[in-house]
Amino acid sequence: MSWMQRLADVYDNNIHRVGEFETRYNREFTLMPIAHVSQNVQLEVILKEDATFHRARVIPKEESSTIIPATLDSANRSGSKIAPHYVHDKLFYVAKDYKKFGSNRKRDENFDAYETQMLDWASQPNAPEKVKVITSYIQKGTLIQDLIKAGIIYLDTEGQVIEKWTSQDDKKYGIEKPPLYKETTGTVFDATVRFDVLNEVSNATSFWRDPALFENFIAYIRDRMMNDRKLIKSDPDTFKKGICYVTGEEGLLTTQHGSKLRNAGDMSKIISSNDDKGYTYRGRFKEPTEAAQIGYDVSQKSHQALRWLVQRQGTYVDTRYFVTFGHIMPETINTFAGSFDLIGASSSATEAVTEELASKEITKAIHGLANNIEGFYDNRLITMALDAATSGRLAIVYYQETDPKLFLDALTHWHTHCRWMLFYRDENKKVKTAIGTPSTFDLAKAIYGDKTNPAVKKEFYTRILPSILERRPIPKDMIRSIYQRVIRPESFKGTMESWDQTLHIACAMISYNDKKEVPDMTLQKENMNRDYLFGRLLGVAEVMERRILNERDKQGKDSRSTNAMRYFTAFSNRPARTWLVIRKQLQPYFDRLYAQSIITATMYSKLIQEIEDAIGPEGMTDIALQPIFLTGYSSQVQEMYKKKEEKDEEHDTTK
């Protein structure tokens, strides 16, 4: 239950943010007050102070998020269960004249339950004036009639409400589908309505965002929980007094817990005990409270905090949501970000040309980000992953609580050990190369491809977290998967994926698992590993062939693949036999090089001979190569292109 305590701490430490709306992905959200829910509404009704209708409008989606006072029953309602919210609710709940205009007779009793609740709250001595005005208005039973007069709801030729607008209605009435009908997925009576009373001040806080309303309702609902529960139809064990297993303190308990944690349509719950039929408890318990007793306050706070954190800084892949946060200040560093995401494309770290410089720059950048987050080092940092196997049950599939210093050390270790020369786009959208760590998104794309099943990707995100946060090796099956993709370069043709970037990401993963104190991506001439040396051989052949092919084209390009590329798969499986084939096919390129420059041709010949000698007769076999062969290939290619660039620059300066 430590996750609930940490989330309740988040709520208590950020209670000043309750009702402060933020925007992400063009959607508004806020840390919700307890005993309230957030719901997207489609209709807004403004009343005059004398409890008469003033105007109504259809709400655009970007303004639709509304805080609604609710009971535990209404917050968890489903199906045809009658459990009204307070003040704002669906039209068939808040309209007394629904019986006159609606066609679903099963909903005829919904308004009565809503009215009873509203009358009870409005009758309290300290009830908000606007609650009294709204209660007086809904008792008149003219809401649907007023909406018809306002041109929000339409009648057919027989004077009946058009509940659903069809394409035939466009032709029949000579107008396109009205706004409210566009916004509702069911009938027009399924639209959610929010109320407000005309304010004397134009910039006054909207009723559904008024902190005074939140506090008043919380006090009212607490009084009802303690002294008069007849209006709150809940599980018999809800609101009993007992010891909370989370806080260890005595207080009101609850067996009903929050849903809609991942998104507005998510009805799955982390804690649920409503399925009391069959073999749910397997004979272990008679009542769910025998398994755990959870306080109302800690349940409300922890679920509201988790919902807020997911909306604010969560990452989702398919149905799985990931969030990292501090229990005091929620802001933290993005666990899944790549080096260029964290430090920015224009940072000095992207200009680092050596591993030592790159390591220092990324370390400085990560610690700089932490220092810029207020209270970062006072936090306990928690990483959670949530997913649902069914529509009703939500599971915490990953949980890790970390000291901030250890978190920074782990993140720095990841970004300084899982790195290679990568491509990125600068602020001018130009493609450049720099030493860096790929983002988790890029890792998943490189390992499994663009079109892989989202379920595979979400498992990858979960399984890579221990490597990022706990310094564990990258799982071997991931290394095998990306290796099998890289050794088939021809499979990348006709796709939007880059073979070179995938190769470099593979090298970053391989170097991370190498467990060296300082991973070395430069050419290791002293490395006598057979697989590494074979990678170097293929790299020399690739650069040599590509040089000649480019020279054949006056524009400096040639679309043909080199022999090194075409034989890449065969070379990885049967290196000795395939190298003999490639070696033989290099002869025409040597002839052309000797005609151009004896020095250059000799350099290539000498380099190949040195690597072959290092492999030796005992290593020149057809035993399949291991993934480290890719790092030898990449390092050799980069080294040779780097020398060519330096030579070209030197040539330019002597002109």
Image: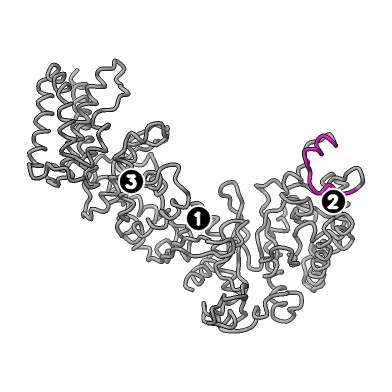
Q: In this rendering, which labeled residue sits more in front, label 1 or label 2?
A: 1
Question: Disc 3, disc 1: CB below 8 Å?
Answer: no
Residue lying at 73% horizontally and 82% vertically, measured from the top left:
227
601 in relation to 184, above or below: above
546 in relation to 468, above or below: above
78 in relation to 198, above or below: below
State how many labels appear.
3
Q: Which residue is mark 3?
A: 482
Reply yes or no: does residue 166 show up in magenta: yes
Q: Which residue is mark 1?
A: 314
What residue type is disc 2 on? His
Decide if residue 384 is on the left or right side of residue 487: right
Alpha-carbon distance for marks 3 and 1?
Answer: 27 Å
Decide if residue 27 is on the left or right side of residue 117: left
> In the picture, residue 218 is in which quadrant?
bottom right
The quarter of the rendered structure image containing the C terminus is top left
Alpha-carbon distance for marks 2 and 3?
Answer: 64 Å
Is there any visible trace of residue 50 in the rendered image? no
> In the picture, residue 238 is in which quadrant?
bottom right
Residue lying at 84% horizontally and 49% vertically, measured from the top left:
147
Q: Nearer the viewer, residue 109 or 69?
A: 109
Q: Which residue is mark 2?
A: 54
Is there any visible trace of residue 21 in the rendered image? yes
**Comes first in the chain, label 2 or label 3:** 2
Decide if residue 251 is on the left or right side of residue 533: right
> In the picture, residue 634 is in which quadrant?
top left
Q: Position of residue 430 (x, y in %)?
A: 39, 31
Q: Which residues are magenta?
A: 160-172
Q: Nearer the viewer, residue 503 or 422?
A: 503
